[in-house]
Structure formats: structure tokens, C-alpha cells
Amino acid sequence: AGAGRCPQGAGFAAPEVAMPAVPSLVDRYFTRWYKADVKGKPCEDHCILQHSNCNNTGSIFAPRRICVITLAGPHLVLQSGKAIKSISYQISTNCSRLQNKVSGKFKRGAQFLTELAPLCKIYCSDGEEYTMSSCVRGWLMEVNESILHKPSILQEKPSTEGYTAVVLPKFEESKSITEGLLTQKQYEEVVVKSINATTATS
């Protein structure tokens, strides 16, 4: 990450990326991975929650390394003063993630996503527009339609009710999909480095 990658300057607060003292349901059953500056755009960071391969978690998400795509704490959309006007899963004229219909154990009808495949577009009241990407290869299992009706939960609860989509990697790729992603520790180092660089130049 380059110096001052986040344009907030003095208004940028250190994000909450450290693990809580008491693990939450998410931290108990998922491993957090991060993608910083998605598609080269500063501070448009994503968090990928990868399900731990366990069959008796009681989680709403199935096992087998399934991934839940969310916003990471430092993402511009989650910074103070940002208000989301609307969210759309219509990523192009001919493609809507809402048309994704999955059936059967062979996941018939599921859209296949590459790492850079767009998931949704976020429109803010200040005129800014942000695109969320898959960050991992796999089948699109579901999108979160709740954020369409109440966009604010994307900001209020980004790791739980405000998730964007659920992606199921191919079985043979389930262990390699995190290549190119950052661990919790690595991501914290990137964020701290960015904050220090911003402070030094302000």
C-alpha cells in the first residue's frame, strides 16, 4: 500500500480490525481474509469470511469453505459522514445478480464468478459510486436482498446482516482461493502503515 492510500486525511479514524476479546459468532466459525484496494482503488477494501470446514456449527451458512463477501472496516462507504442512497445488483444492462437462481447439489443456474467479478453497486448521497467485487472464484449462491430495502445495514452490520453475497468455491479450489488475500495480521499491518503515512504527510 502506498503512502496515504486513503484520501480521508485527518478525518480518517483507525478502523476496528482487531479481534474482540470474546469471539463473536462470525469469528468463531469464520476466518477473516482481506483484499485491500480492490481493483487498485485506494481504501475500497473487502473482507471475505471463509467458513471453517466444520459440519456442526449451527451457522446459517453451509460448510465446505463457503465465503461471505463483506466490506472491510476502512472501506470508504463505512467512514463517518457517508450515507448510502441505494444499492443495486444490476451490474450491467444484461446481467443482474438477482437473476441468480441455484438448484440441486450441482448448483444449477448459479452464476460463476471470477475474483474481479462485480457483485453490486453502492450509490452514496454525495454522488460517489462504489462497486463491490467477489474477490474469490466460485459459484454465486445467494445475494443479500435485505440491503436493497435497508441500505444502512451494510454500514451498521457489515459482517453479519449487512453482507453482500455468498460464494461457493469449486471443491478443488477451496484451499487455494485465499492466495492473493491478506490474513488478519497482514491486513492490520497494511492499515497501520497507511495511517502512519497519512499522519506523517498531514
Image (cartoon, rainbow, N blue to C red):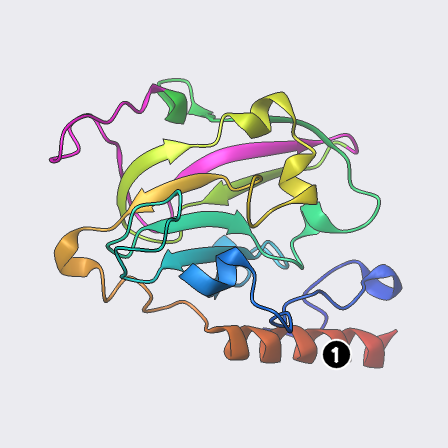
Residue sitting at 81 percent across and 64 percent down?
A: 13
Identify the image quadrant of residue 105: top left
Q: Position of residue 33 (x, y in %)?
A: 45, 65
In the rendered image, the vertical position of residue 162 relative to residue 25, given as above or below: above
Q: Which residues are magenta?
A: 99-126
Instruction: Check disc 1 and give the amino acid type.
Output: Ala
In the rendered image, the vertical position of residue 151 relative to residue 200, given as above or below: above
In the rendered image, the vertical position of residue 47 relative to residue 138, given as above or below: below
Q: Is residue 167 left or right of residue 46?
A: left
Check if residue 116 falls in the magenta segment: yes
Q: Is residue 86 left or right of residue 49?
A: right
Q: Is residue 183 left or right of residue 45?
A: left
* Disc 1, SS: helix
Name the dominant secondary structure of the magenta segment. loop
Q: Nearer the viewer, residue 90 or 23?
A: 23
Check if residue 152 falls in the magenta segment: no
Q: Is residue 90 visible?
A: yes
Q: Position of residue 147 (x, y in %)?
A: 58, 29
Q: Nearer the viewer, residue 144 or 83?
A: 144
Residue sitting at 51 percent across and 78 percent down?
A: 186
Q: Position of residue 126 (x, y in %)?
A: 79, 34
Q: Is residue 179 left or right of residue 9?
A: left
Identify the image quadrant of residue 124: top right
Residue sitting at 65 percent across and 54 percent down?
A: 75
Q: Quadrant of the N terminus?
A: bottom right
Pointer 1 residue: 197
Q: Quadrant of the C terminus?
A: bottom right
Q: Position of residue 76 (x, y in %)?
A: 69, 51
Q: Is residue 30 visible?
A: no
Category of crowding for the residue at label 1, using alpha-carbon neighbours closer than 10 angstroms: few (below 14), some (14–19), many (at least 20) = some
Residue sitting at 69 percent across and 74 percent down?
A: 194
